[in-house]
Amino acid sequence: MLELLVETRCFAGLHRRYRFHSRELAGDTVFAVFLPPQALEGARVPVLYWLSGLSCTDENVMQKAGAQRLAAELGLALVAPDTSPRGEKVPSDPEGSWDFGHGAGFYVDASQAPWSRHYRMHSYVTLELPELVEAQLPISNRRGISGHSMGGHGALVGAMRHPGRYSSVSALAPIANPARCPWGQKAFSYLLGSDNQTWQAWDASALLSSGQGPVGPDGRPLPLLVDQGSADPFLASELKPEALEAAATASDHPLTLRRQAGYDHSFFFVSSFIDDHLRHHAAALLS
Amino acid sequence: MLELLVETRCFAGLHRRYRFHSRELAGDTVFAVFLPPQALEGARVPVLYWLSGLSCTDENVMQKAGAQRLAAELGLALVAPDTSPRGEKVPSDPEGSWDFGHGAGFYVDASQAPWSRHYRMHSYVTLELPELVEAQLPISNRRGISGHSMGGHGALVGAMRHPGRYSSVSALAPIANPARCPWGQKAFSYLLGSDNQTWQAWDASALLSSGQGPVGPDGRPLPLLVDQGSADPFLASELKPEALEAAATASDHPLTLRRQAGYDHSFFFVSSFIDDHLRHHAAALLS
C-alpha cells in the first residue's frame, strides 16, 4: 500500500513522495519519485535509482540536484529512497553521530544483531523498491543506478552484486573503498561484524578487482562513470577513487573517472555534473 | 568590508556567500553571489538580482532553483540578498509569526518606529547592494531584477520606483497587490503605518495602474514576465495576479502573465520556469 504524501508539478511532470511499509526494512519508509511528462501520457518509462549520502533523506536530491529538467526532457523517471531505516524501534549510532545509523545505513544487508532486523538497505533498494514501483507506477524494468558519496558506494555495489539487473551505473564522489576508510570501517563493523573478510563483498573496489565488475542485461560489462571533485575535503581519507581506478585497471573494466578541478563534496558539485550522468544513463536506458 | 564566508565551485563558476555591515540595514547581513565562468576570466558580467520570499534566506534560491546552469552558459551573475534585516537588535513580528519580521522584510523602507531603523530592504537591495557588488566584484551595472512571492513584489516595485536603473524585470508568483492582501496589509501596517494611502507607492499594481510602470535605461517601458501556478494555495488570497494584469491593461504596459496549470508555490515551480526568466533577462542584459 503506497500512501501518497506529496504531489507537486515539476517540469511538466510530477514530483511525489510516498510512504509504505517495507518488508526488508521492517517498518515504514518514505521515498520520492519524479515522473517525467512521458509517464503521465501513458508511457512506461525507464528509471534511474538515486542513492543519497550520509545524513540525507529522499528530499535532498529532489530539491538540490536540478535533475528533473533533463530527466523530463529525456523521459527518465527518478526514484530516491531514504538513506536508512528510521523510527523509534530502529537502532542508531550508539555515539549519536551522523556517520552511522539513522540517515546512514550504508546500503548493505546487516548480518549482526541488533542491526540485521532493519538495516537491509541493499535488498530494499535493489529488489523491494524496484518491484514496488514497477508494479504500481508507470515505470519499466529498464534500470540505472547512481548516487552520491555513501550513495555512490551503494550504487556501485548494488550494480556489481546483481549482474543483469541494471543497464547503467554511475557515481558522484563515491566511498569507493569502504573497507579501508573510517566511515566504512565504522559502519561495516557494526553491520557486518568484525571479520573484515566479509566486508569485501560490500566494497566496490574489492568486488571490481576480483572480477565482479557490473554487467548489464546483455551480459556485457557496464561502463562506469565516476566524477570526483579535487577540492572535496573527504577525498583522501574517505573516498579513495584511486582504489576504484586501480581495480578497474587490474580487471580491465571500463571506467571513466573524471577529477573535477576545484569542486567540493556539496550539491553544488552534484548539480554541476548531474546532466552528464543522466545522459550516461539515458544512452543505455533509452537505446 | 566584505567577509567571504563560503566559496564553492559550481558549473565552472563560483558560488560565494559574503557578510558585511549594511548601512541601510544598520547591521550585518549575508548575501550570496554566483559568478559565472566568464567573470572568472576577467569579464565584468551583467547581473540578475534575485529577491526571495517569506522565510527564505540567500540560500534557498542558490540551492533549489537550479539557476546556475543556464546563468553559467549565458554569462550572468546572480546576486541573492537575505529577506530581511536580522539580529538580536532587529525587532520582529510581535506575534512570532513567519509572515512578518525576520525573514519577511517586504522590501520596503519602513517609516514607522521601531521598524524604520533596520527595515530598509528596498534601499538596501536596489541601491546599497548593487553599489557594493559593482565596486568589489566583476559585476557590471547592467542589472535585472526578479524574485519569488514576497520577492516578486520586491522586484516589481524595485524596478518601478527606479526608472532607468534596471534593464529587465520579472517575477514568479509575486504578491502583486500587497495593499489588498492579508500578508501585505499586516506588514505595511507595521512598516508604513495605518494610512493606506502611503501603501500605494509600494504596491506594484497601484504603481502600474497610475502610470509608473518600469522603465529601462533607454526610457522605454520594460516588458514584464510573470509566471503564476494555477494550483498555488496563495493565489486567490495573497498573490492576485489579476490586479497586475488589470493595471497593465489600464496603463497599456507590456505584460506576459503565464498561468501555469497545476503548479504550486514551491521551488519545484520556480525551478521549472527559472530558465525562461534567465533568458528574458539575458535578452535585455546581453543585447
Image: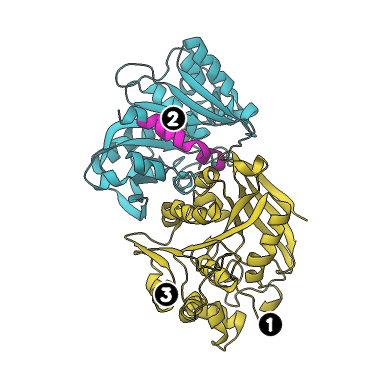
Chain colours: A cyan, B yellow
Within 10 Å of disc 3 (Cα), the crowding (few <14, some 14-19, many 20+) is some
Between the residue at mark 3 and the residue at mark 2, the CA separation in whole angstroms equals 56 Å
Residue B235 locus on image (x, y percent): 39, 70
The magenta segment is A268-282
Q: Chain of mark 3?
A: B
Could you say which is closer to the camera, residue A141 or residue B218? B218
Q: Is residue B218 visible?
A: yes
Q: Main secondary structure of the magenta part?
A: helix
Where on the picture, by quarter, is residue B242? bottom left
Q: Secondary structure at mark 2?
A: helix
Task: Name the residue: 61% across, 65% down.
Answer: B165
Residue A127 locus on image (x, y percent): 33, 32
Observer-side mark, 1 or 2, equals 1
Q: Which residue is mark 2?
A: A155
Position of A253 relative to B253 (above/below) = above
Q: Which mark is residue B113?
A: 1
Q: Which residue is mark 3?
A: B252
Between the residue at mark 1 and the residue at mark 3, the CA separation in whole angstroms equals 38 Å
> Within the magenta stretch, is there residue B63?
no
